[in-house]
Image (cartoon, rainbow, N blue to C red):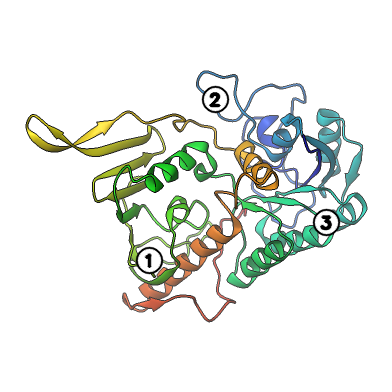
């Protein structure tokens, strides 16, 4: 079994806190050195999400790295020295840094989890590659602009470094099962995909594309919200180079994969359903079929992101399910939908020429 040295940059909620405390309202300025921190229990064996039939799975990147036998958590970086102290007490790590760049240059970890706010994520990802990282995990959103996302994807691709961007539902093993069912022809040829929105932070739909987006149309986008987010809020449609249509509409399930002889539907509360066209005494009907394990269950935290990166390093996976490429693609689609809506539903061709375009996210991002 290969052994990997891991480090975490940013000891906030996804970096560490979720597995040591309950969430609190914690308004702050993103550049503050000291931020509100709840009462922490370094001995706590409680995870942010309960897991049916189990004692729970890690949510944070620190806990996920600490729990894997082939990974040794060796260093942490955060500007808040109190959080560094707690990190050390919880995980027995002595290599603590208030400067992430210094940590990367001194420790040169094999696996780097980047859990900072979005502002510096692109730079830190590229620096981690420069200092020899073999696998990189980032929290969502991936980046603010297309140029930043391009840098991250290109840097990792050139160094053959798997990049997983965000602990989202797509990282759960049930999504790999769904993709396998599609590839095995269990619902026939895919004719359309449906999702509630493009959600560059939570893009379930992009995992099932086998062809690049060609153009989009969108409508109904609203102005930037008070929280600071400018994410697309309307409805729209995407067409890929091979003619597949993806619909984004309010009220849609997490994802619906419609095929020529069946469909698969994912909902966050109930998980996956499989329907197939079958001959019955009353003629051909679409019948619900038991979902082959694994079925989706919370949590879908960093434990699955890390598993994907380790599978890539072992040669068992070509890219993480929530890979940098797929997330960057979703970001571009979301930006294009905003442009279309602003132009009264005009067709917007992809790829976008202006790579300085981007999105703003909520205050805590």
Asked if the residue at tag 2 contacts the one at tag 1, i.e. Cβ–Cβ closer than 8 Å, the answer is no
Is residue 138 toward the left or the right of residue 179 in the image? Answer: right
Q: Which mark is residue 221?
A: 1
The one nearer the camera, 204 or 4, is 4
| Quarter containing the N terminus | top right
Tag nearer the camera, 1 or 2: 2
Is residue 244 toward the left or the right of residue 151 in the image? Answer: left
- The total of numbered circles placed on residues is 3
- What's the CA distance linking mark 3 and mark 2? 36 Å
The image shows residue 57 at horizontal and vertical percentages of 61, 28
- What's the CA distance linking mark 1 and mark 3? 42 Å
The image shows residue 9 at horizontal and vertical percentages of 77, 49
Residue occupied by mark 2: 50
Tag nearer the camera, 1 or 3: 3
| Quarter containing the C terminus | bottom right
Q: Residue furthest bottom?
A: 353
């Amino acid at each position: 079994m290969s052994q990997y040295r891991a480090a975490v940059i940013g000891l906030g909620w996804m970096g560490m806190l979720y597995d040591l405390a309950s969430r609190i309202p914690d308004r702050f300025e993103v550049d503050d050195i000291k931020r509100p921190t709840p009462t922490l229990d370094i001995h706590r064996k409680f995870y942010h999400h309960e897991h049916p039939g189990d004692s729970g799975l890690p949510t944070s990147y620190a806990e996920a790295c600490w729990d894997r036998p082939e990974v040794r958590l060796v260093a942490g970086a955060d500007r808040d020295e109190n959080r560094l102290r707690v990190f050390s007490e919880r995980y027995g790590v002595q290599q603590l840094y208030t400067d992430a760049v210094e940590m990367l240059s001194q420790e040169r970890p094999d696996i780097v989890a980047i859990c900072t706010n979005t502002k510096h994520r692109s730079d830190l990802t590229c620096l981690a590659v420069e200092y020899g990282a073999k696998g990189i995990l980032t929290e969502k959103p991936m980046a603010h602009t297309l140029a930043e996302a391009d840098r991250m994807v290109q840097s990792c691709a050139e160094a053959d470094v798997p990049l997983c961007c965000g602990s989202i539902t797509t990282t759960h093993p049930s999504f790999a099962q769904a993709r396998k069912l599609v590839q095995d022809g269990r619902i026939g040829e895919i004719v359309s995909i449906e999702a509630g929105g493009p959600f560059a932070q939570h893009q379930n739909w992009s995992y099932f594309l086998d062809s690049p987006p060609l153009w989009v149309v969108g409508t109904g986008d609203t102005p930037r919200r008070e929280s600071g987010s400018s994410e697309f809020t309307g409805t729209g449609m995407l067409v890929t180079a091979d003619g597949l249509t993806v619909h984004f509409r309010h009220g849609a399930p997490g994802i619906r994969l419609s095929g020529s002889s069946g469909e698969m539907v994912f909902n966050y509360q109930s998980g996956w359903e499989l329907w197939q066209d079958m001959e019955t005494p009353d003629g051909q009907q679409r019948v619900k079929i038991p979902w082959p394990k694994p079925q989706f269950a919370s949590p879908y935290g960093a434990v699955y992101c890390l598993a994907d990166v380790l599978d890539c390093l072992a040669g068992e996976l070509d890219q993480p399910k929530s890979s940098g490429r797929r997330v960057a693609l979703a970001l571009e689609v979301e930006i294009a939908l905003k442009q279309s809506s602003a132009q009264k539903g005009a067709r917007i061709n992809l790829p976008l020429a202006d790579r300085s375009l981007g999105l703003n996210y909520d205050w805590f991002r």
